[in-house]
Amino acid sequence: MNYYAGIDLGGTKIYSVILDESGKILAREKVKTGSTDNQNDVIQRISDCYRKALKTSGIADDQIKAIGMAVPSPVNVDRGILIHAPNLGWKNIPLASIMHRETGKPFFIDNDVNLGVYGEYSFNKNIKGENIYGMFVGTGIGGGYIRNGQIIRGKNHTAGEIGHMIVKTGGPHCNCGRNGCLEAIAGKLGIIANIRKKVDKEGKTTLLSTISPEWRKNIGSSALKKCWDAGDLPVMKAIRKSAVTIGIAAANLINAVGIDTLILGGGVIEELGDVMIPLIRQSMTEYSIGNGAEGIEVVQSHLGDDAVALGAGWFASRPENRRYLITQ
Ligand SMILES: [Zn+2]
């Protein structure tokens, strides 16, 4: 049997899995990403994380045939180049070659959300059809698009960046430097901005001041859920606005390319999927042309922390993807 490794390189942690050729995960390990100022140190920690997982799995190094790694950046997958990862402060790095030299394995890298959606597409039985879009709602909103089993990356490797679809011209400022992007309204930063509007400008009160005093900077998704359950009005309003806006973005996708299944994941959806998904579906239906949204599946991601690393390892394992493996 052949074995593979998948790695998820994130801003705070590195997560590695070992899988067999059926996609079964044999081991999982994680280490802290730590400071990213010194690239060589991070590369060492990625390698350590892989070797830790390998040891836990009991698989010998020479049985690992390829490694896939997900990075928080657009990626030139033909050359294995990380284009720009603001969270890591890295730009234009031939990371697949570097990791190939470090591990001795054929190596593949791609964008983390692309690979998370690919993982769900490959292993989530609720997904129907061949035109699949995934949105992951956290601090920002990431997206990935799969058509007929292929990850669609676009001419310049930026396709799928749904978080920066403009849904309100002249809307709130986004971290990307433009205004009115989906994530500036519906991602966690947008949700915070909308709660602030109610509390700081209109004088409403929120439970967050008690349960999460630092909420103006950052909120855990579980605190948002607690506030929703307690009927906290500023939070409920911001969550509803987020859901309706995600629905508008989904309708735009349906109108533009016609999807079969929308996968929703990320911390906000994991906590609030039960309340948000019906609202998203309703808004998606309302804003699609004609009966565009009829029969479209809206499913919650179910692989959790494994999705991205598993997607990375699985992609690297597939014979049809061999041409993407970097071996020098
Ligand atoms: Zn933006």
Image (cartoon, grey):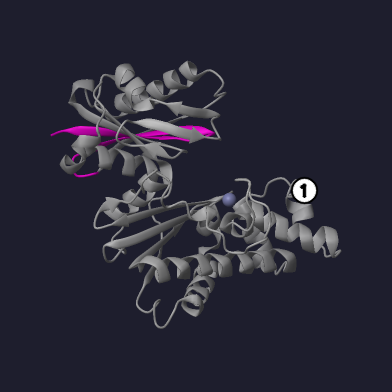
Is 3 on the left or on the right of 11, as rendered? left
> Furthest residue to the bottom?
290
Tell me the magenta residue range: 1-23
Residue 72: percent from left, percent from top: 47, 38
The residue wearing badge 1 is 213
Question: Picture quarter containing residue 225?
Answer: bottom right
Q: Is mark 1 within 8 Å of ligand 1?
A: no
Count up the numbered dots.
1
- The three-letter amino acid code for the residue at tag 1 is Pro
> Furthest residue to the right?
203
Judge whether residue 15 is colored magenta: yes
Question: Picture quarter containing residue 254?
Answer: bottom left
Judge whether residue 189 is colored magenta: no
Is 169 on the left or on the right of 303, as rendered? right
Residue 183: percent from left, percent from top: 58, 55
Q: Decide whether the magenta segment is chiefly helix, strand or loop.
A: strand
Considering depth in this image, is 187 or 13 the residue closer to the camera? 187
Residue drawn 31% across the image and 17% down it: 101
Residue 236: percent from left, percent from top: 67, 67
Quarter of the rendering occupied by the C terminus: top left
Residue drawn 26% across the image and 51% down it: 150
- Can you say whether 75 is above or below 142 in the image? above
Is 220 on the left or on the right of 72, as rendered? right
Is any part of residue 190 visible from this angle? yes
